[in-house]
Each structure stands twice: as C-alpha cells, then as structure tokens.
Amino acid sequence: MVRWPHARVWYTVGVLMTLAVVITMLLPSRLLPTLAISDKLEHAATFALLALWFAGLIELRGYVWLGLLLLVLGGAIEIAQGLMSFGRQADVRDLFADGAGILAGLALALMGLRHWVQWFERWLGRI
C-alpha cells in the first residue's frame, strides 16, 4: 500500500464514492433522475472512475485484485437488485459494462493517470 501525506483523505473519499455508488444503484429507479445516456455507459463510467481512483492509491501489483474486487462489487449489486422489489432488475449486461469500465479505468491508470495522487499531493504542498 502506497502512503501519502493525505492518504486517509483519499481513501475516505474512495470509500464514500463506493458507498454512493452502492446506494444509488440500489435506490428505487423512480427516485433517480433520467440521464440522457445509456444505462450501460453509466455503469462503465462509474466503475472506470472507481478503478482509476483506487488504482492511484495502491501499488501496481494490486491492480488484479482491485479489478476482481470491483467486479465482485458489481456482481453483488446486480444480485441485490434482483432480490429487491423496488423496480430494479438484475442485468448481466450491467455486470459486463462494469467490467468494461474497470478495464478502462485500469488501462488509464497504466497509461500514467495512476499518478493522480502524486499530482494532487504536490499541488497541495504548494498552496
């Protein structure tokens, strides 16, 4: 695990983002705004953001585990949606979109965006 001066802040924000994702995906659909984009794109973008966020906080060797944990999270959300009667439905295509987003987020991290924490820490050190 990589340590940064503000590591607790970064991890706390990541956990809060993850909780927000879980809550949002489990809320009754009638309570959510309708966005002008595909539901699958929403899933992919959400999981890409989570993957990229946490990829900036862990060492490169943990990326496989990160991807697997996020995929398990996506699967657990789909199972929960299938068990609920709030107008939500389990959809295996959502899980595939989650997986595509995870791969995209990790690919962006591998292309250099994993250094986002470093950039913010440097910036914070200047102000």
Image (cartoon, grey):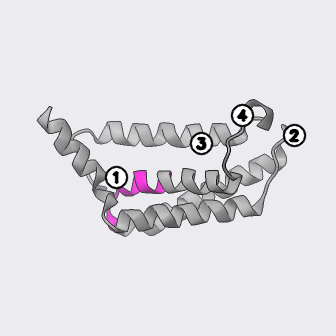
Q: Residue drawn 34% across and 36% down?
A: 9
Give me the C-alpha separation between circle 3 and circle 4. 12 Å
Q: Is tag 1's residue or tag 2's residue first in the polypeptide sequence?
A: 1
Mark 1 is surrounded, within 10 Å at the Cα level, by few (under 14), some (14 to 19) or many (20 or more) other residues, namely: many
Give me the C-alpha separation between circle 4 and circle 2. 15 Å
- Can residue 114 be found in the magenta stretch? no
Local secondary structure at mark 4: loop
Q: Is tag 4's residue or tag 2's residue first in the polypeptide sequence?
A: 4
From this viewpoint, which residue is outermost toward the front? 36
- Location of the C terminus by quadrant is top left
Location of residue 105 in the rendering, given as x and y in whole percent from the top left corner: 46, 61
Q: Which residue is mark 2?
A: 85
Local secondary structure at mark 1: loop
Q: Foreground residue, 9 or 113?
A: 113
Mark on residue 57? 1
Give me the C-alpha separation between circle 1 and circle 4. 30 Å
Mark 2 is surrounded, within 10 Å at the Cα level, by few (under 14), some (14 to 19) or many (20 or more) other residues, namely: few
Residue type, numbered disc 4: Leu
Q: Which residue is mark 3?
A: 21
**The residue stretch that appears in magenta:** 50-60
Give me the C-alpha separation between circle 3 and circle 2. 19 Å
Residue type, numbered disc 3: Val
**Image depth: mark 3 or mark 4 in front:** 4
Q: Which residue is mark 4?
A: 32
- Is residue 16 visible to us here? yes
Location of residue 14 in the rendering, given as x and y in whole percent from the top left corner: 44, 43
Q: Residue drawn 87% across and 40% down?
A: 85
In the displayed structure, does residue 26 sit left or right of residue 62? Answer: right
Q: Residue drawn 17% across and 44% down?
A: 122
